[in-house]
Amino acid sequence: GAGVSQSPRYKVAKRGQDVALRCDPISGHVSLFWYQQALGQGPEFLTYFQNEAQLDKSGLPSDRFFAERPEGSVSTLKIQRTQQEDSAVYLCASSFSGGRGAYNEQFFGPGTRLTVL
Amino acid sequence: AQKVTQAQTEISVVEKEDVTLDCVYETRDTTYYLFWYKQPPSGELVFLIRRNSFDEQNEISGRYSWNFQKSTSSFNFTITASQVVDSAVYFCALSERNAGGTSYGKLTFGQGTILTVHP
C-alpha cells in the first residue's frame, strides 16, 4: 500500500542487545516523526526530521537512543544496550511538509512492538 | 509545557447511543492545532479531525462532531449513533511549534479513552 510501513512489527530483545527499527514514510513526505507508546498510555514524541535534518530530538530518553534519516526518506531508530523500560510500541509518522504555513496531518505506521526481556 | 488531559479512562455504551469524549489542554502558544485520533486494536493511529486555535466554530462531519472552547481550553469529541466498529482507544492531541520555533510538528497526546460499544 501507499501508507507508512514499519519493520519489524514485533521485536524481542534480551537486555543489553542493540536493536534497529525501520520506518518507510509515505513517498514525498518531508517530515518524519518517531513516537514511543508505553502500554496503556498515549504516544510520546521522540524525534523529528525534516528531510534528512533532525530538527528536534528533545524527546529521546537517553543517549542510548539514536535516529537517522540519511537520504531524507527511510529512517532508522536505534536503541543501544536495551533495558526493560524500553519495552513499548514505537510509532513512526510522516507528513507532507514541515515548514511554515498550513499544518499537514501526520499519517502513522502500524508500529513496532519491542519487548525487552 | 504543553499538556493534554483526557479524564475519562474508559467509556462503555450500547450501540446507537451518543457518546462524548472529553479533552482539556494546556499551552502557552497562541497558535496551535488540536486533533482527535482513533487507535483500533490493530494499533495504527487513524486521524479523525483537526481544529486550529483561530477557529472556534464547531462542526459536524458525518457522525462526528466537536466542541472547541478556548475559554475553558476544552476540545470535546462526540460520536452520534455509536456503532460497534467505533470501539477503539481515542486520543486527543495538541500540536505546537517545535523546539526551534520554526514549524508545527510534534504532537502531545492525552492518555487516551477506551471506548467500548456493545451491540
Image (cartoon, coloured by chain):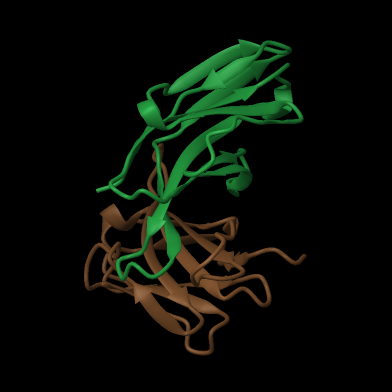
Depth check, front residue: A107 or A90: A107
Q: Work out which residue is located at the far bottom of the displayed protein and give it.
A: A71
Give me the chain that's brown: A
> In which quadrant of the rendered image does the N terminus of chain A lie?
bottom right
Corner quadrant of residue B118: top right
Which of A88/A115 is in front? Answer: A88
Horizontal side of residue B47 vs A19, given as left or right: right
Nearest the eye: A71 or B51: B51
Residue at point 69% right, 19% down?
B80
For residue B36, above or below residue B44: above
Say which residue appears at 53% left-offset and 66% top-offset: A101
Q: Is residue A117 visible in the rendered structure shown here?
A: no
Residue B39 screen position, x and y as percent: 58, 40
**Residue A64: horizontal and vertical position, in percent?**
25, 72
Q: Disc count in the image?
A: 0
Q: Residue B77, relative to residue B110: is it above or below?
A: above
Query: Residue B96 appears at what percent x and percent y?
Result: 39, 55
Residue at image location 50% in from the left, 77% down from the top: A75
Q: Position of residue B16 (x, y in %)?
A: 73, 12
- Kindly identify the residue that appears in the image at 58 percent across and 46 percent down: B43
Instruction: Kindly indicate which chain is depicted in green in the rendered structure.
Output: B
Q: Vertically, is B91 above or below B13?
A: below
Is B79 or A69 nearer to us in this picture? B79
